[in-house]
Amino acid sequence: MSQSEGNNLISVDFEIFGRVQGVCFRMYTEEQGQRLGLVGWVRNTSGGTVVGQVQGPSRRVEQMKLWLRKEGSPSSRISRASFSNQHNISKLELAGFTTRF
């Protein structure tokens, strides 16, 4: 992935609320991140939400944010998506897109 797409690299944390556990949300998030050429991670929380971090070209990260907010996995029901700590990065700080436990 290069910055020659005219996009600066950004990093953003997310938390997704609703029916997002037990519906393959993490698997679909991982696949969508890989499809967009992003790096990051995703995991369930004890509070019933899904949290994670996404890094990559800003345009693609914005596409991922829209997917997290509106789409998710086929069986999920997203009530709210929260994004925080968005900032520019000089290089990717993660490798691949993984599910953390």
Image: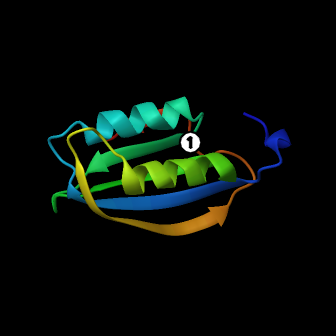
Q: In the rendered image, is residue 96 in sight?
A: no
User: What residue is at 16 percent from the left and 58 percent from the top?
Assistant: 48
Q: Quadrant of the C terminus?
A: top left
Q: Residues within 10 Å of mark 1 (few under 14, many from 20)?
A: some
Nearer the observer, 12 or 62: 62
User: What residue is at 18 percent from the left and 40 percent from the top?
Assistant: 23
Side of 24 relative to 64 (left or right): left
Residue under label 1: 94
Residue 67 appears at what percent x and percent y? 44, 48
User: What residue is at 42 percent from the left and 43 percent from the top?
Assistant: 41
Residue 58 appears at what percent x and percent y? 67, 53
Label 1 SS = loop
Nearer the observer, 39 or 17: 17
Side of 5 relative to 73 (left or right): right
Residue 76 appears at what percent x and percent y? 22, 46
Q: Quadrant of the N terminus?
A: top right
Residue 47 appears at what percent x and percent y? 16, 63
